Amino acid sequence: MRIITRKGFVGALVLASVGLVSSSCNTSKATVDTFAKFTSSTSPGAWINADGLVQESQKARLFTAVAFENLEQDIARGNGEYLTSLAVLLNIPAGQQAEFRTRAQSTYPLLFASDRRTAESLLVTLPSKMEDH
């Protein structure tokens, strides 16, 4: 039987935490990059009202830009809190959200094609595909 020393345990703990931090940095960088692309394509006055709040008409765009990777995972699964939140922000009635999730999942290859992997493209393509069915 192998006995783990305190030094070995601390070393393993440090290695595990470094791995977690480095993996979260990649996700954070991707989120920041997506958000930066979104905000650079719009002027602040276009999505922030006089009170400093996000305009109702821009909430889905901002949410999609910030949560893009999480939305991709939820759409691939056909369910999840990010996809549900997007449905609410797009004013999809509660009774139609299951159908919305199913259709979003079925159009995953189109929504996340390599030539259109942006939040803007996702929002443009997603509602038009929902209307087609």
Image (cartoon, rainbow, N blue to C red):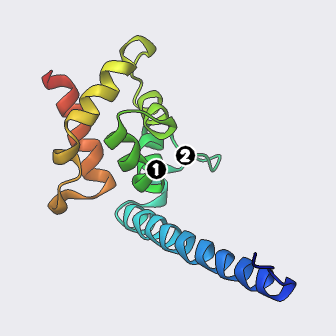
**x, y percent for residue 61:** 40, 46
Q: Amino acid at mark 1?
A: Leu
Dividing the picture into quadrants, the one containing residue 103 is top left
Q: For the point 13% across and 24% down, which residue is it? A: 132
Give the CA distance from mark 2 to mark 1.
Answer: 8 Å
- Which of 122 and 81 lies nearest the eye of the viewer? 81
Binning the other alpha carbons within 10 Å of mark 1 as few (below 14), some (14 to 19) or many (20 upward) gives some
> Secondary structure under badge 2?
loop
82 displayed left or right of 132: right
Q: In percent of the image, x 16 and y 46: which residue is there?
A: 110
In the image, is 101 to the left or to the right of 125?
right
Q: Is residue 105 above or below residue 3?
A: above
**In the picture, residue 91 is in which quadrant?**
top left
In this rendering, the answer to whether 97 lies above or below 76 is above
Q: Are marks 2 and 1 in contact (CB under 8 Å)?
A: yes
Q: Position of residue 95 (x, y in %)?
A: 41, 11
Q: Is residue 63 left or right of residue 4?
A: left
Please state the horizontal and vertical placement of residue 64, each as a whole percent of the image.
Answer: 41, 48
Q: Residue at x 34, y 63 (%)?
A: 41
- Quadrant in which the N terminus appears: bottom right
Count of marks overlaid on the render: 2
Residue at 32 percent across and 25 percent down: it is 100
- Determine which residue is flagged by label 1: 62
The label nearer to you, 2 versus 1, is: 1
